[in-house]
Image (tube, grey):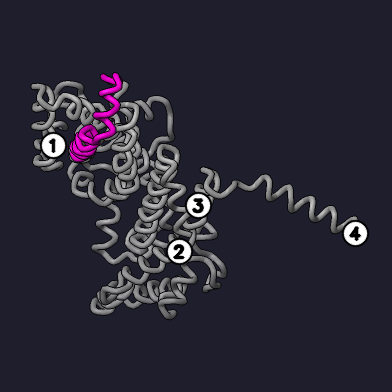
Amino acid sequence: MKAARAVLEDGLALLRRAAPREGTFGAYALRRLGAMAPTLLVISLLIFLLVQLPPGSYVGNEILELKARGEGAAAERIAFLEAEYDLDKPILEQYAIWLGVWPGARGFSGLLEGDWGWSFAYERPVSEVVGEAIVLTVLVNLATVIFIYLAAFPIGLYAATRPRALGAGGLTFLGYLGLAVPNFLLGLILLYYAHAWFGLSIGGLMEPRFLGEPWSLAKAGSVLAHLVVPVIVIGTAGTAAMARRLRANLLDELRRPYVRAAAARGLTGPRLVLRYPLKVALNPFISDIGTHLPALVSGSVIVSVVLNLPTLGPVLLEALRSQDQYLAAFILVFVAALTLVGMLVSDLLLGLVDPRVRFGALKER
């Protein structure tokens, strides 16, 4: 008995030594990861309830229309689907079945089991409707976020360190222009010149001959070529806003007494800017990563329609219009998951850049 207790105590001591210590980056990351699951659960419940709020449903409206036309056989089929997908159950039971924690007519078959639901408008599983659109949406969003930060960082840095230079004034003007020009109008202009100068097809994310074809190097190259226009169009406003924010934050830091004191000690030029002011000014710049990912999905719906992009934006718009509840609910949950992933990335980057963030989170506990 004593030997078993000694072995158990040694194992617990080993686990305690291996676990991240409080205040370390590992402990901070684990706390942030642990908060994601319950947050996403609450968000999914709210989304499911909100989708159900409008009166009627796709199936109910279709049944009424078919009955009015006297098509009883089709109405019976839709009524079968209604029972098959548990639409006749109470709303909280529907949510539990959709989530996959409560058995329905097909047993345990929900999000947790990989069943994303049935799209009544497309008469296909949701996974088939949004399968490739999810990949292309993530690709467009990641490329746009990278473009925003790669463009906004040097512009904001230059405008802050050379506030009276002619180039800084020009960049500021371009920033206001990027915020003022409607995205869909810029998209139409760039589409015209991309087609006239480079021969790219109008709209879409690939040449028409690659639609429905398996992925290959030629198809991937076509996607990358067609990414340029939507990334510039969607990312222009974000780039302008981020550059102006970094400029304002850095200008505020450069006026601080500690910067003047460092300059008085002989620290000048890029070393003075990079040593402390830029690190502090980057905090809001980094924290915006969490808001960019979902904003790009929801805010680029009009651009996606105008440019005919096969992303989730137009699918979500059609699902909400037709009250295709499972399709709309899954896309909204996916956007919420993107939000949480973006917030996690920004929190982790902030924890690496500024130790005060993770120690501040420790004091809040």
What separation in Å lies between label 3 and label 2 (alpha carbons)? 14 Å
For badge 3, the amino acid type reads: Leu
Report the Cα–Cα distance between label 3 and label 1.
Answer: 36 Å
Q: Which residue is mark 2?
A: 41
Tag 4 and tag 2, C-beta contact below 8 Å: no
Q: Nearer the viewer, mark 4 or mark 3?
A: 4
Who comes first in sequence, dot 3 or dot 2? Answer: 3
Of labels 4 and 2, the one closer to you: 4
Q: Secondary structure at mark 3?
A: helix
Q: Which residue is mark 1?
A: 178
Query: What is the C-alpha distance between the residues marked 4 and 1?
Result: 73 Å
Instruction: Report if residue 361 is visible in the image.
Output: yes
Separation of marks 2 and 1 at Cα, in angstroms = 37 Å
Q: Which residue is mark 4?
A: 2
- Image-based side of 278 in relation to 170, left or right: right
**Front in this rendered view, residue 176 or 74:** 176
**How far, Cα to Cα, is label 4 from label 2?**
44 Å
The three-letter code of the residue at mark 1 reads: Gly
The tag on residue 33 is: 3
**Magenta highlight: main SS:** helix
Give the mark toward the camera: 3 or 2. 3
Residue 80 magenta: no
